Amino acid sequence: MAEYSFFNRDLSWLSFNDRLLMEAERADVPLLERIKFLSIFSSNLDEFYRVRMPVLMAIDNFDDRNGLNNTYYKARFLINQQQERYGHLLANYILPALKTENIHWLYNEAIPDHIQDELAALFFNEVLAYIRLFSVDKDDDGFFAENNKLYQAVMLTDKAGVERLELITIPSDVLPRLYAVNKGEDKYVVFLDDIIKNNLAYLFPEETITGVFNIKITRNAELNLRDEIGEDITAALEKELKKRDLGFATRFLCQPGVPLRHLYRIIYTLNLSNSSIVEGGYYHNLKDLNSFPLQDAKLSDSKWPSIKSLAIKKEETLFDLIQKKDLMVHVPYQQYDPVLRFFNEAANDAFVEEISVTLYRVADNSRIVNALMTAAKNGKKVTVMVELKARFDEANNIRWASRMKASGVKIIYSDADMKVHAKVALVKRTLRDKSQYLGLLATGNLNESTARFYTDHILLTANQLMLQELQWLFDFLGKKKKNPLIEEVINFKHLLVAHFNLQQKFLSLIDREIVNAEKGLPSGITIKLNNLEEKILISKLYEASAAGVKINLIVRSICCLIPGVPGQSENITVRRIVDKYLEHGRLFLFHNNGKEEVFMGSSDWMNRNIYSRIEVCFPIYDNVLKQKLIELLNLQWKDTIQAVQLNEAMQNNYVTGEEKIRSQQAIYSLLKGA
């Protein structure tokens, strides 16, 4: 293999965070939408500290090189730069712009006298019930600062001049983080933190408050199931989930200006000396800005009501339509109803005997899961592969798995070292003594909540050859092999399944484009992914570029491929799109000398997707559906409003063009007019 260069995955993650900040900085983006992007930035950064910083810190401990050269310090430097931009944006643009709309967001400002009474009433009527005090200086207090919980560190001095440290919980997990108070034409937005701070004298009537500081501790979020393989998977996971919030501290976040003697006292008392000490803003967990308490149409993006995707007459069913031709739903542009109806019909159709489904992230009040439980109660054989290791959704998935099991659903789980990330469902019917399959294969989770803002594509098909292979996959998953890496002899010809043929098939598709380019025939590749990391596939794209294949990549987040490098990737262009909806669908288009082939599915090209997950991608055979997907891809590639182009220095540069195209809006208009 040639010697190729790659972007670092962690620095690329932070490059995507830079892209989110760019969106928040844009004056032409509605004001409340800019605040939403600040929220997403904060949420992503929290996840980075929970998931990736522990890895970088561990590597740093074994790294003999100069600290300034390693990824940990580069990441710290980039994060500090981004947080400075974040604070500058808030102070100099967002807050003043709100004030011009008579919205006073009291961000590190004194609370005006004329709203003191309302906020005091809120404190005593709503907040006080959830306040917990911890005298952490006392050895017997047993205090442990929980992961990502908000605290106020309060320095107190008694009448004898003795100083002590008290911690107060900020109960943002059960109460709104931000409150709105109206006074005439003026609106005031106040942090829960400040409502508490403003009433601290009530809690400490006999002591003098000498300092109040907002702090947060972020802890390692990784779960270790390898030591629990002999246990029941749900019991092992529940045990690990209890440990998650007890993981070692990766970041101690404090507000600016904490006196050093107080700062060191907090660090020592809470055993934080080995964590990254970060001076952030005055408030933490700004992902809570996603519930900013004011709604104003003129300060928000325009609404795009979801479009009816299928017209079904009273005398026919969805299953009738699927048997006639393949169908596709593009969410959130189109209504999710056909997906819900697929499971509702399966639960009650007299001819349905079996239903098999993979579930990765489940909605809190999932109608899909309720339909599956109804199907089991109706006497149908229902098998659900529940992925209990879906990060940060583990507890919710355990809850649903328990409920389904109690309803008669057969629950199967993946191996401790293997996630099942496929998004597929299979229905088996028997009509006139003949078995028939109906299937649903998607790029995103079977989750009606995320379907409102994730762009995904769902195929509904009766292609018996493809669905027979899906049955083979469910049979394989149901065997609960001790080592799922041992591949059975399953000859997938239609489905692309990780650990069987997915990587090999994509490599062969790229090879075919290389051969065509070398023969002087038309060639080209367009791929849309969330993340691109896996070096064998990237290297093959580099090889294709060197052969003259034009490659267009739309990669939302992590991208380890370096575009535009002479002799390596001069024929590869990488773009990112950040807009109203979260780009989530994975699409793969190969020119094939004019006989275009399109695939879609659940798999990014990350190491985890290729080597430690069961993923399913699949071809689109229906020519009408195929052409529609190509049209959507082309619109995204032409985006000159929300797209940026990644250069060889990992910088995000806006795409320019004479024609102004916002691809998500163009796709909505296209589907609405179809």
Image (cartoon, rainbow, N blue to C red):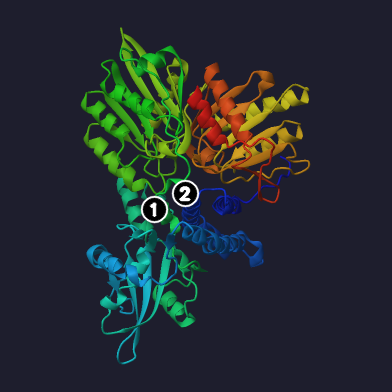
User: Toward the viewer: 649 or 656?
Assistant: 656
Q: Is residue 636 left or right of residue 415?
A: right
Q: Residue at x 41, y 70 (%)?
A: 214
Residue 434 appears left or right of 380: right
User: Is 320 above or below relative to 566?
Assistant: above
- Which residue is the site of mark 1? 294
Secondary structure under badge 2?
A: helix
Q: Residue furthest front?
A: 184
Alpha-carbon neighbours of circle 2 within 10 Å: few (<14), some, or many (≥20)?
Answer: some
The answer to whether any part of residue 443 appears in the image is no
Asked if disc 1 and disc 2 are in contact, CB closer than 8 Å, the reply is: yes
Hey, what amino acid is under mark 1?
Leu
**Residue 173 picture quarter:** bottom left
Question: If the image is split into quadrants, where does the N terminus sit?
Answer: top right
Residue 257: x percent and y percent? 49, 76
Q: Residue 662: give x, y in percent of width and height.
A: 58, 37
The image shows residue 644 at horizontal and vertical percentages of: 63, 44
Label located before the other in sequence (1 or 2): 1
**Residue under the point 60% across and 62% down:** 81
Badge 1 local density, few (<14 within 10 Å), some, or many (20+)? Answer: some
Quickly name the residue at label 2: 299
